[in-house]
Amino acid sequence: MDAAMMETSLSIPVPPAVANKLLRAQALLGGVGERLNSMEDATKSTHGGETTSDPADSCADNDFGPSVLGTKEYWEDAYQKELETFRDIGDVGEIWFGEESMSRVLRWMDKVKIPENAAILDIGTGNGAFLVELAKHGYSNLTGIDYSPASVELTRNVLQAEDLMDITVKETDFLNCPGELKDFDVCIDKGTFDAISLNPNNTEEGKKLYVQALKDALKDKGFFAVTSCNWTKEQLLDRFSEGFDFVQELPTPSFQFGGKTGNSVTALIFQRLC
Ligand SMILES: C[S@@+](CC[C@H](N)C(=O)[O-])C[C@H]1O[C@@H](n2cnc3c(N)ncnc32)[C@H](O)[C@@H]1O
């Protein structure tokens, strides 16, 4: 549905900016079931929801099928619209998984005393909202990357509006940037590994490339803070078992639905082994 044409259930036309937000919220909240709030559930699978288990992949996180949310075209289109909205009314757009998803990582960074000059990478920065929060928190060595040119443009616009011009923002495909990203003390991912896991063309390959790219980007003993709506703690532990130590799980809200309890998101901290 075109956002501009979207109407509420009462058939009240809503402005495009509001409609965009509703569409994104609808996408995020579309799936309520065994795993609440999953991105894969949010839109129709391009392969009719079939899973793509790779017998050669021993990890337990192969139970989602591909989705348009795993495509660059989807994100380019989404951020193009958000860029227009930002230019029109100054709204930065979707904060994936809400403000609290940033606050809980920042609280952990405070607790373990990540120094203010630590080199921090936001993988798949989207609208750059996390970069803004990190900078406001005092962090001064920040890099955000995204493979969507519109996301990069939006992030630059958002940072400029916040007068935060010392942050590096690059159009980079995290899965294909050999040697470009290295020596980071902390890598943050909020929803990007989820998106990569849903790529219709290379679901299993993408997950493996992601783990290798993460190892390359982090310093020895560097931290990885991942927030996921698709994968359980156990699945993430399995995927990041080689080359990383599990440090801790950050508490996230849980829901009850149909007599079952599920977490809306999983937030874990890992540390790169030497
Ligand atoms: C769910 S959005 C999350 C955006 C942002 N982290 C946030 O929390 O708002 C997923 C992001 O990952 C980016 N992304 C997906 N695959 C990528 C890749 N291979 N390299 C870089 N960015 C990627 C998308 O463009 C999108 O901005």
Image (tube, rainbow, N blue to C red):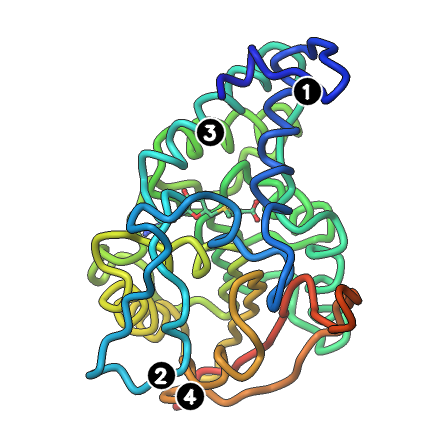
Q: Give the residue at mark 1.
A: 18
Q: Is residue 14 above or below residue 189?
A: above
Residue at position x 71%, y 78% in the image? 112
Which element carries disc 2, helix, strand or loop? loop
Which element carries disc 1, helix, strand or loop? helix
Count residues near mark 1 (Cα–Cα under 10 Å), then give few for <14, some for 14-19, many for 20+: some
**Label 4 CB sits under 8 Å from any ligand 1 atom:** no
> Distance between the Cα atoms at labels 4 and 1?
41 Å
Residue type at tag 4: Ser
Residue 77 percent location from the top left of the image: 40, 27
Determine the residue located farthest toward the front in the rendered image: 258
> Distance between the Cα atoms at labels 3 and 1?
15 Å
Residue at position x 23%, y 55% in the image? 177
Count residues near mark 4 (Cα–Cα under 10 Å), then give few for <14, some for 14-19, many for 20+: some
If you read the primary sequence from the N terminus, does the residue marked by circle 2 or circle 1 appear first?
1
Task: Left or right? Give the position of 165 relative to 163.
Answer: left
Q: Give the residue at mark 2.
A: 59
Q: Is residue 272 above or below residue 82?
A: below
Q: Give the residue at mark 3.
A: 79
